[in-house]
Structures are given as C-alpha cells and as structure tokens.
Amino acid sequence: MTVEALPSPVRTGFPTGFVWGAATAAYQIEGAAGEDGRTPSIWDTFSRVPGAVRNGDTGDIAADHYHRYRDDVALMAELGLGAYRFSLSWPRIQPGGRGPANPAGLDFYDRLVDELLAHGITPVATLYHWDLPQELESAGGWPVRDTAYRFAEYAQLAAGRLGDRIPTWTTLNEPWCSAFLGYGSGVHAPGRTDPADALAAHHHLLLAHGLGTAALRAELPAAAQVSLTLNLAAVRPLSTDPGDLDAARRVDGLANRIFLDPVFHGRYPADVLADTAAVTDWSFVHDGDLAEISRPIDSLGINYYTPTVVAADDPAAPAPRQDGHQGERSPWPADAGIRFLPAEGSRTAMGWPVDADGLYELLTRLRDDLPGTPLLVTENGAAYEDYSDPSGAVHDPERVAYLHGHLSAVRRAIADGAPVNGYFLWSLLDNFEWAYGYSKRFGIVHVDFASQRRTPKDSARWYAAVVRTGELPD
Ligand code: FCB
C-alpha cells in the first residue's frame, strides 16, 4: 500500500478539527505579583524560603506577561495557534482565598480573553495551577477539607465573569504534584513533608475538583466543557520478575488509579488503600465525597514528559531514587521496597529521559480504560540549554526532535483509536520553572528575562509549520 492510499487520518496524522495549542501557567509567566489587589500565593511564600528555589528566583516579575499579554497574543497569532491554555491566578481573582471577587483581577483575564478571541485563538482556562492563596495554606492548606469548598467558591466567581467566552475549563493541573510534591517531598510549595498530609491533600484536591465541576456547570453555558488535567505516569516494570511487577502495580496505584478510579468510577482502589494503610486510615473520605468527585466531565487532559521505570528494591545495589523529581524525601507515600530508575535514552536539561513511546502507551491505555472519554494532551515539551547566538537566533534542534517524536507518538495513538482531540505544547514562553527558577527553559519562544525580549526559537517556526499544515515533516 502506498502512502497516498492510506486513509487520511494516518497519512496526515491529525484529524480535522484537531486543536493545536500552547500552554503556560499564571505564576510562571505573569509577574505583577503585588498589582491590582493580588495577594501572595504559596509560591510567593515558598520562593522566599532560603534554598527552596534555585538562585532564590521568584515569580515577582517572571515573563511580565501581565503587562505584555497583547504582544504575547500577537506572537501566538503569528505562530498560528488555534488555542491557548493558561491558568487563572486564584489570589488575583479572590485575594486571600475567600470573600468577593476582586474586579481588577478579573479585568486582566477579561482583557486577555478578549484579545485571544479577537485573534481567533480559543481560550482554555485552568483554575488551579498550584497558586493557592497563602491565607488558605495558613488555615491548613489542602490537607484541610474547607479548602475544597473555598475552591468551589472561587470557581464560581471566575466562571461567573469569564464563562461566556471561555469554552473549555480545567479544574486542576496535576493534583499529583500539588499533593505529593507540595505536602510529601516538600520540593514544591508549601514545602511540607508528611505523607499522611499528602494523602489528605490528594483527597481534598479531588473533592475540590468535584465541587468545582458542579460550581462551573451552574455558571457556564450548557455547551461549555469541563475537564481535569493529570500527570499520569507511564509506569514500566524493569523486568517481569514478580517483585518488579508488584512495584509497578503499586506505583500505578499511587500515580494513576488513585485519580482515575475516584474520578471515573467513584471509588478508591482497594490495593492503594491497603498499601497506604500504615500512613493513613483515609478517614478524611466522607460519605458522599466519591459521588461528588465522580461527576461526569467532558474530557481528560494528559501531561506527559518522561516514563517511570520501577523495580523491586535491591538491598545489594542501593540506588538513588530517579523518578524525575528532586528532593531527598520521596513524594511517594508508603514506597518502601520500590526503586525508581531512569529510562534509557538521551536526557533533557531536566535530566528526564526522552521516550515518546511512554506517551503512546498512556494514550492507548486510556483508550482502553476509559472508553469514550475524549483526551487532550495538555502539556508536552522539553527544556534544553538554549542560548541566543550572536545574530540573536536560538537554534534548538533537540527540542524539535523531542516534539517530532512525541507528536509522532500522538499520531500513532490516534491511528490506533485513541480519541485525542488536541495537543498543547509546554511551553509558549520560557518561564519560572518552579523549584528550578529561571534555570530551565521550556519555551518555544526565548525570553531574555533582563530585557523581557521575546525571540521565537527554531522550534517555534517548526511548530508553526506543523500547526499550519497539520502534518509532521519527515
Ligand atoms: C509540569 C507543570 C508545568 C511545568 C512542566 C515542566 O509538571 O504542570 O507547570 O512546570 O511540568
């Protein structure tokens, strides 16, 4: 069969109507940390803790997107993006995390959304990309049940003002990171290190997702879509030895089924409850919570960077935990006896192995496990040691290769029946990469943080061509 004779989804790869976008998050790009009534979030506090963020970097200025959003939207239009995934800053919209909305905070998103729409770019908004108002953390944070109710209130305020123009809403970005890096290993804000708190935070984040979904549905037009974005792990056992297979089962439980089962089936997996019984009795799960958490959603967002290889512990060859997350403490509750190893392959500047098959594995697994649930790749991309050459150009062939490989994996998953409707590249701009500060550059647009000058990298031009043609160059 010649290439021409293949049915069109295989030849061109991406179905008609496939959404091509790029993603960012509020604290990573906006700056303007103290402007127009915004109050501190846990990241403003955490980034000031000595040693918490590389170089003492903070999001105070970041990419100054708050003031430069018009130029940034113009850049997106030049690249031909069909959609833009960004997050709303809770402490900008509802300073302090309770009480009435701050009109000046909402005005910013109002202007941004109108600017996007004027350029034909669909806004895709995430309500929570990790910037909990500090007051709510001071009142106990995500391990406390009330935080979930506060989130639903915030969701209602945001949707009430912006819901007429934003067709797709995501409640949470990567609650695994919020719970397990924020309250388990402590490498993310608020920097707490208690596995029982991490599991309570996990449950309350899911409760916030459920209550938030209900609040959004009450405010949004019927056609609006509600989703959730998870950083599911493409878990691979090192071998087929029973010990390695059991390690894979446990990590699949703690990374994947701990989310998918409650959200899509209204239950926690029995093996995860058993595996974590020594850490918590799960008494924070109240009657009715799982019904709330499993309210139907319209799509699932997947963020993927690198796979997770696990094995049974080998006391004879102790090895550092290499799960892609920094920190001395493990984010994984009850992980005794599990080794985390790197996958084969070249590494990005984060040290994350490049392995596009993991994305294919995840998408086809979800095709099988959640039949009929539309999927979106809401983040995928790579950091490399980018620099501008004397002419000002930024050549990033490794990023182009990474993107090519991962988009090929998406195309292959679609050809094999995975209902993937869109792809959002992480990230539009170089930005504040959490505990790594400004030292890691994920953008397809280079940002000189001293001058705030934006320079599209080679990967931006490459991606613009993919977006324009819907095809991957050979
Ligand atoms: C994801 C986050 C995003 C960015 C990328 C590299 O975990 O959602 O904000 O930091 O990783």
Image (cartoon, helix red, strand yellow):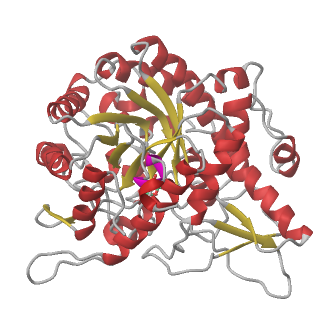
**In front of the other: 2 or 183:** 2
Q: What stretch is highlighted in magenta?
A: 8-12
Q: Report the image quarter containing ligand 1.
A: bottom left
The residue most toward the right is 242
Q: In which quarter of the image is the C terminus?
A: bottom left
- Please, is residue 128 above or below residue 148 in the view? below
> How many numbered markers are drawn?
0
**In front of the other: 117 or 126:** 117
- Please, is residue 467 above or below residue 211 in the view? below
The residue most toward the bottom is 316
Give the image quarter of residue 201.
Answer: top right
Left or right of 304, for residue 15: left
Main secondary structure of the magenta stretch: helix
**In front of the other: 463 or 123:** 463
Q: Where is residue 29 in the image (x, y as percent from the top left)?
A: 27, 52
Q: Is residue 445 visible?
A: no
Q: Where is residue 224 in the image (x, y as percent from the top left)?
A: 41, 21
Which residue is pictured at 84% across the width and 80% down the height?
A: 314
Q: Can residue 414 be seen in this view?
A: yes
Residue 307 in magenta stretch: no
Q: Where is residue 274 in the image (x, y as percent from the top left)?
A: 88, 46
Which residue is pictured at 25% across the width and 58% down the height?
A: 465
**In front of the other: 353 or 287:** 353
Which residue is pictured at 41% across the width and 57% down the height?
A: 4
Q: Position of residue 361 (x, y in %)?
A: 64, 57
Left or right of 410, for residue 97: left
